[in-house]
Image (cartoon, rainbow, N blue to C red):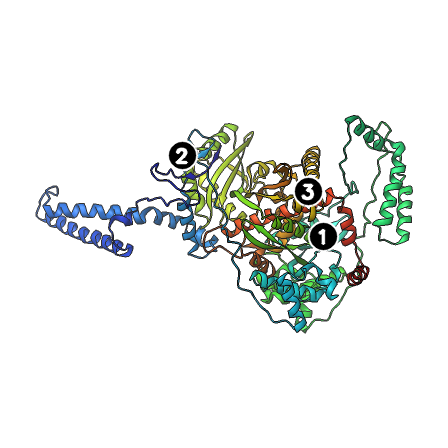
C-alpha cells in the first residue's frame, strides 16, 4: 500500500471548470468566532479569561470565608462560568495544539529551516488550494481521488522581456550583435565569420541577453581558451561554469600513493572520500585489478527472413572469419579515427603477440577460448620520492604554513578555520599538494572563484576549479514559452544536435510537457527480532488512520516538507520504508532525510525493539539504476510530446517519418529490451540531462535515475507527421541549495527564469526546470535519431569531434566554391 494525501471532496452543487483553480476549503477556525480583526479577537478573549477568573476566585474565597456552599451560584457567577469556558475553548483551539508542538519541535525548526518566513504561507496556501487531505491511501478500500500535481506556470509566448543592453567595444561588434538578435546572422556561424572564438562568444552572449531579457552576470566569460574547443566540443559557447576541485588522499593503491581530484558541488563528498582514503592507507592500502578493457557498439540490421539474419550471426561469430573482419575494422579506424603517432600501432601489434592473443578465437563458439589477460597498470613503488615543485609564497608566514602542511603538522582540511581566508587557504593547500606529489597543477585555475561561497556548503579542501564551457540550444518552445537552454559539456555535436531538435520542434508549433508526480523519496532500513514484528510496523505505517499523525511528525522537519505517502517492502525480518514527500524548490534529499529521522525517533516509543540499520536502505533509490524509480517515480515525473510536421522531418532533420518510427522500434525499444535495459529505452537522454544538470548546479550523480526515459514515436495524420514523446519518471532537480548557489550556475538558472525559490508558488521553479529538462531531452532524441536514420552520426562526429582545422579557412574555401 502507498499512503497518499487526496483532494478534499467538493460539494456536488459546486462545479469547477477545467481551467479554473480549485476552490479553497472553507474550514472554520477559532479566530472566526467574532467578525473582528484577529489581534482584537485574541485580546478580547485573553481579557475575558483573566477577568472572569479573577471574579470567580474572589467570589469563591468569600463563600469559603462565609461558609456558603460553592454549588450555590448566582446569575452573575453562572454567566462568568460560561464566559470562562468559552475563553478556554477559544484559547486552546487557537494556541494549544500548535503551541505545544512548536515547543517540542522548536530545535528541529531552528536547526534545519533556511528559507524565508513568508514562504511558509505559500506552502499552506498551496495545500489548501489543492484541497489535499492526509487521511486517504492508495491500495486501501477507501476510494481515492487522484492527486494532480501543480503544473508549472505558463508564460505567454508573446511576452517580450525588456532587453538587457551592454555597450559593445566597437561599432562593428554592435552591428553584429544586432544582426544576431534580428536573425540575420546565425549564432553558430560567428566563429567562422569573425575568426576570433573569444569575440564570437562575447557577441553571442550579448545577443542572448538582449533576446531573453535575462542577465548572464555570474557566468564567467574571461579566462577560458575558446580556441581549444572549436570543432572539438560544446558548440555556440557563451561562457563557462566553474566547479570547485577538492583533493582526497593519499589513496594507497597497488603500492602507489595518489592524490585524487574531485570536482563536485555536493557537500561532505570530498571529506567523506578523504576519510575512506585515510582508513585504507592506515590498513596497508588497496589492490586494484583490471578485468577487461574494451569498448562496444551494436548496430541493428534487418533481413527479409529470420534465417538470413541467423546466417549473418553465424558468419560473424565464426572464428574462421574473425581475422578478415578484424582487418576491415582496424583499417577503417586507422584511416578515419587514429590520431596517434605511427609507432603506437607497432606497440599494439607487439603487445598482442606478447600476450598470445589469437584472432581466431571467439565467444559463443565451440572452439576453446583462450582468455586474454589485459595488461595491468604499471605499479609505482610507494618509496619513490618525486622531485618537489616549489613556488615561492607571497609571504614568509605562508611559506611556513605550506611547509607545516607538507610535513603533516597542520591538517590540510583545517586551513580555512585557522586562516579565516578561504582563497588563501586554497592557494596554500594547492602549493603543498604540488610539493608533496611533485606534480604541477598548472592549467587548473585558482583565481576568479569565490571560495567563501562553498565553505561549509560544497567541495571541501579546494585547490582550484575546473572550467566546463556552456553552449546554448534553442529557442525551445515548450508549453507556449521560449527557453534558451544552457548546456555545459565537453562532447562535440551535443549542443548543435540539441539545437537542431529545438529548431524542428519550434517550426512544428512547440512541445507540450505535463508534470505527473512531484515527490522526493528516502527509504530507511530497520530490523526486528521476528518477521511478525516487522509486518506489524508495516501495517501501522500503511494504515491511512495513522497518516495524519505521521505527517505532523514528518512535516515539522521543514517549512516545505509535506509527507505524501509511505510504501513498505519486507525481506524476512527486515523492513524497508519508502517515504515520499514534496520539497518545495529544493531537490530535497536532506529535507526528506530529516523528516524520516523524526518519524524513526517517534516510532521508537511504540516499537522499542526496532533496530535502525541505516537512514538509507537503497529502496529510495538514490544515484543507482532501480526499477522502483522507473515504476513509481522519484523527484519529478514528466511526459513531454510534440508533433513534428512531415516537411520539417524532411527539410530540417533530413530523414522521413517511416524511417524514424522503424528505427525507434528496433533501437530504443527492441534493442534496449534485448540488452536488459532498466529505464534506458532511449537514444541518449543522459547526454542532455548531464549537460543541463552541470550548467544549472544540479547533482550530476543523479543523472543515473534522472535519465530514465522511454522515447516513443509513431506516425500520425495519415502517416504524414511524427508524434514523438519522452516519458521520464524520476527527474531530480532543485533551484535552491547545493550547486545552484554558485555564481555561474545561478546565472544559467536565471537564463531559464527559475533562479532561487519561487515567490508565487512553492516548488514552481523546480517543477518548471524539470519540464525544461524533459523538453531538452525530447529535442536531443529527435535530432540524434534523425542523424542515425540518415546515416549522419559518424560523419558529424568525424567532422566536429576530432577537428583540428581552421574553420575560417574552411568558410572562405566554401565561399570560393560557391
Q: Residues within 10 Å of mark 2 (few under 14, many from 20)?
A: some
- Judged from the image, the secondary structure of the residue bearing numbered disc 3 is loop
Circle 1 is placed at which residue position?
A: 491
Labels 1 & 2 near each other (Cβ < 8 A): no
Q: Position of residue 143 (x, y in %)?
A: 42, 31
- Judged from the image, the secondary structure of the residue bearing numbered disc 1 is loop
- Judged from the image, the secondary structure of the residue bearing numbered disc 2 is helix
Labels 3 & 2 near each other (Cβ < 8 A): no
**332 sits to left or right of 517:** right
Which label is found at residue 683? Answer: 3
Circle 2 is placed at which residue position?
A: 545
Q: Is residue 251 above or below residue 165?
A: above
Q: Position of residue 67 (x, y in %)?
A: 8, 45
Q: Position of residue 292 (x, y in %)?
A: 79, 41
Residue at (50% x, 27% y) in the render: 532
Which residue is nearer to you in this view: 219 or 167? Answer: 167
Amino acid at each position: 500500500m502507498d499512503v497518499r494525501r487526496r483532494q478534499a471532496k467538493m460539494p456536488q452543487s459546486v462545479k469547477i471548470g477545467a481551467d479554473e483553480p480549485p476552490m479553497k476549503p472553507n474550514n472554520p477556525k477559532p479566530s472566526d468566532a467574532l467578525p473582528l480583526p484577529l489581534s482584537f479577537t485574541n485580546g478580547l478573549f485573553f481579557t475575558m479569561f483573566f477577568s472572569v477568573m479573577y471574579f470567580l476566585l474572589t467570589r469563591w474565597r468569600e463563600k469559603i470565608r462565609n461558609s456558603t456552599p460553592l454549588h450555590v451560584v448566582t446569575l452573575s457567577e453562572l454567566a462568568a462560568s460560561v464566559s470562562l469556558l468559552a475563553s478556554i475553548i477559544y484559547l486552546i483551539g487557537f494556541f494549544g495544539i500548535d503551541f505545544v508542538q512548536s515547543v517540542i519541535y522548536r530545535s528541529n525548526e531552528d536547526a534545519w529551516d533556511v528559507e524565508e518566513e513568508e514562504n511558509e504561507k505559500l506552502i499552506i496556501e498551496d495545500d489548501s488550494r489543492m484541497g489535499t487531505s492526509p487521511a486517504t491511501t492508495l491500495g486501501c478500500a477507501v476510494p481515492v481521488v487522484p492527486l494532480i500535481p501543480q503544473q508549472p506556470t505558463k508564460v505567454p509566448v508573446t511576452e517580450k522581456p525588456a532587453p538587457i543592453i551592454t555597450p559593445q567595444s566597437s561599432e562593428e561588434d554592435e552591428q553584429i550583435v544586432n544582426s544576431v538578435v534580428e536573425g540575420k546572422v546565425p549564432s553558430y556561424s560567428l566563429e567562422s565569420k569573425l575568426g576570433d572564438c573569444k569575440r564570437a562568444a562575447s557577441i553571442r552572449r550579448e545577443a542572448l541577453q538582449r533576446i531573453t531579457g535575462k542577465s548572464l552576470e555570474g557566468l564567467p566569460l574571461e579566462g577560458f581558451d575558446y580556441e581549444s574547443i572549436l570543432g572539438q566540443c560544446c558548440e555556440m559557447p557563451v561562457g563557462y561554469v566553474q566547479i570547485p576541485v577538492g583533493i582526497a588522499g593519499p589513496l594507497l593503491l597497488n603500492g602507489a600513493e595518489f592524490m585524487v581530484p574531485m570536482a563536485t558541488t555536493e557537500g561532505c563528498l570530498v571529506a567523506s572520500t578523504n576519510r575512506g582514503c585515510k582508513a585504507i592507507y592506515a590498513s596497508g592500502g588497496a589492490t586494484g585489478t583490471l578485468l577487461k578493457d574494451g569498448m562496444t557498439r551494436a548496430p541493428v540490421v534487418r533481413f527479409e527472413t529470420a534465417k538470413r539474419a541467423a546466417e549473418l550471426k553465424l558468419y560473424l561469430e565464426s572464428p574462421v572469419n574473425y581475422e578478415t573482419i578484424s582487418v576491415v575494422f582496424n583499417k577503417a579506424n586507422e584511416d578515419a579515427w587514429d590520431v596517434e603517432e605511427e609507432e603506437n600501432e607497432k606497440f599494439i601489434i607487439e603487445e598482442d603477440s606478447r600476450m598470445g592473443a589469437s584472432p581466431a578465437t571467439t565467444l559463443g563458439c565451440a572452439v576453446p577460448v583462450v582468455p586474454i589477460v589485459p595488461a595491468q597498470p604499471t605499479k609505482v613503488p610507494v618509496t619513490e620520492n618525486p622531485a618537489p615543485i616549489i613556488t615561492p609564497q607571497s609571504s614568509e608566514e605562508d611559506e611556513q604554513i605550506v611547509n607545516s602542511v607538507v610535513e603533516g603538522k597542520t591538517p590540510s582540511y583545517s586551513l580555512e578555520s585557522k586562516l579565516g581566508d578561504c582563497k588563501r587557504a586554497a592557494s596554500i593547500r594547492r602549493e603543498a599538494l604540488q610539493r608533496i606529489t611533485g606534480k604541477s597543477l598548472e592549467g587548473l585555475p585558482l583565481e576568479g572563484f569565490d571560495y567563501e561561497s562553498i565553505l561549509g556548503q560544497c567541495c571541501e579542501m579546494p585547490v582550484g576549479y575546473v572550467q566546463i564551457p556552456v553552449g546554448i540550444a534553442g529557442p525551445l518552445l515548450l508549453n507556449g514559452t521560449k527557453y534558451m537552454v544552457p548546456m555545459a559539456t565537453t562532447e562535440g555535436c551535443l549542443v548543435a544536435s540539441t539545437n537542431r531538435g529545438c529548431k524542428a520542434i519550434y517550426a512544428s508549433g512547440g512541445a507540450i510537457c505535463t508534470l505527473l508526480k512531484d515527490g522526493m523519496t528516502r527509504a530507511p532500513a530497520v530490523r526486528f527480532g521476528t518477521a511478525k514484528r516487522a509486518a506489524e510496523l508495516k501495517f501501522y505505517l500503511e494504515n491511512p488512520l495513522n497518516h495524519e499523525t505521521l505527517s505532523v511528525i514528518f512535516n515539522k522537519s521543514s517549512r516545505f516538507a509535506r509527507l505524501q505517502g509511505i510504501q513498505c517492502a519486507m525481506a524476512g525480518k527486515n523492513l524497508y520504508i519508502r517515504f515520499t514527500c514534496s520539497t518545495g524548490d529544493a531537490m530535497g534529499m536532506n529535507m526528506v532525510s530529516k523528516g524520516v529521522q523524526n518519524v524513526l525517533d517517534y516510532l521508537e516509543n511504540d516499537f522499542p525493539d526496532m533496530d535502525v540499520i541505516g537512514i538509507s536502505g537503497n529502496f529510495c533509490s538514490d544515484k543507482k539504476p532501480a526499477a522502483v524509480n522507473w515504476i513509481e517515480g522519484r523527484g519529478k515525473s514528466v511526459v513531454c510530446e510534440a508533433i513534428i510536421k512531415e516537411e520539417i522531418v524532411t527539410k530540417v532533420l533530413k530523414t522521413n517519418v517511416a524511417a524514424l518510427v522503424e528505427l525507434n522500434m528496433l533501437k530504443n525499444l527492441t534493442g534496449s529490451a534485448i540488452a536488459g535495459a532498466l529505464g534506458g529505452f532511449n537514444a541518449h537522454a543522459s547526454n542532455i540531462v548531464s549537460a543541463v544538470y552541470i550548467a544549472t548546479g544540479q547533482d550530476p550523480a543523479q543523472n543515473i535515475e534522472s535519465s530514465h526515459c522511454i522515447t516513443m514515436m509513431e506516425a500520425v495524420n495519415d502517416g504524414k507527421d511524427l508524434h514523438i514523446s519522452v516519458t521520464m519518471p524520476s527527474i531530480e532537480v532543485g533551484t535552491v541549495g547545493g550547486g545552484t548557489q554558485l555564481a555561474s550556475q545561478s546565472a544559467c538558472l536565471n537564463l531559464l527564469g527559475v533562479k532561487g525559490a519561487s515567490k508565487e508558488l512553492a516548488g514552481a521553479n523546480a517543477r518548471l526546470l524539470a519540464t525544461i529538462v524533459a523538453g531538452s531531452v525530447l529535442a536531443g532524441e529527435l535530432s540524434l535519431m534523425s542523424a542515425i536514420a540518415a546515416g549522419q552520426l559518424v560523419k558529424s562526429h568525424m567532422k566536429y569531434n576530432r577537428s583540428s582545422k581552421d574553420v575560417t579557412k574552411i568558410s572562405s574555401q566554401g565561399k570560393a566554391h560557391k
